Image (cartoon, grey):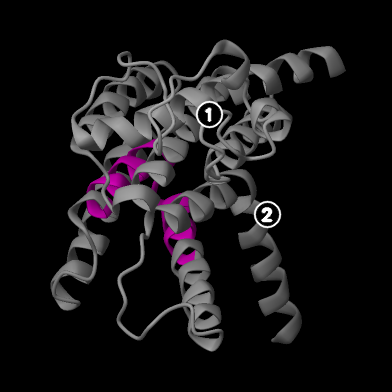
Amino acid sequence: MILLLLYIFIIGTILGSFYNVVGLRVPMNKSIVRPRSSCSSCGHQLRAIELLPVISYLILKGKCRSCNEHISPIYPFMEFITGILFVSAPLVVGFTGELFIAWTLISLLVIIVVSDISYMLIPDKILIFFAGIFLFERIYSPLTPWWDSILGSLIGFIILLLIAIVSKGGMGGGDIKLFALIGFVLGTKILLISFFLASFFGAIYGIIGMIFNRLKRKQAIPFGPFIALGTITAYYFGNELVRAYMNFITDVM
């Protein structure tokens, strides 16, 4: 079992490295195949030993071998977190048909985080690509009841659309479509928990940022990372959180 999980972790980090490329190139309408990965400062094309997920960053001490410029820690972090999430998925959902949905969801969210942090953009190309995969997966492994996917998608779209209208553009179109897709995958209940958690995490980040003068009032911040964090938390622990909340309310009453 341990060897299997280690194998899954390694595969996850390799995919995480690829998802970094996808998240950086697709929003700029660049090929994800060519040219080969290179240093953003000097253009040095990375060799095989410089492309090892996480390990290369540690070996190179976070600097380019050619120009000695610092490499953003976001790259090894996303590689590592993808590996961790890939390992955690079978531990939470088991080795069932739902596992492939979990891995697909993780893949989508990792790419979205990289794209949104880098450009504050969630490309339609990525959402459409994953929508096709999720449609196939939910046909094979539907929610109970099956129409909860449709209802979840509608609710996810409407909630964020209303927020965008009320806030006059405070919510991007990519966020709206992403939540519609998440609603299709997770259903109504987990979607609502995901939305609450994403808003909560975003608010905490905003408060801390303003306290330490890292953010200015009304400064735009990418919401994608908070959607990802809220979605994974809700997907893994949503039912337990609802149960704990209901028990708390019962005890207080």
In the rendered view, does 72 fall on the left or right side of 243? left
* x and y percentages locating residue 91 in the rendered image: 73, 30
The amino acid at mark 2 is Glu
Q: In the image, is residue 225 above or below residue 249?
A: above
Secondary structure beneath dot 2 equals: helix
The amino acid at mark 1 is Ser
Going 54% across and 75% down the picture, which residue do you hit? 204
In the rendered view, does 240 fall on the left or right side of 101? right
State whether residue 151 appears in this view. no
Secondary structure beneath dot 1 equals: loop
Q: In the image, is residue 20 above or below residue 74?
A: above
* x and y percentages locating residue 185 in the rendered image: 39, 36
Label 1 or label 2, whichever lies nearer to me, is 1
State whether residue 50 appears in this view. yes
Mark linked to residue 66: 1
Q: Which residue is mark 2?
A: 240
Q: Which residues are magenta?
A: 175-196
* x and y percentages locating residue 39 in the rendered image: 44, 31
30 in the magenta segment: no
| Viewer-side residue, 138 vs 16 | 16
Q: Residues within 10 Å of mark 2 (few under 14, many from 20)?
A: few
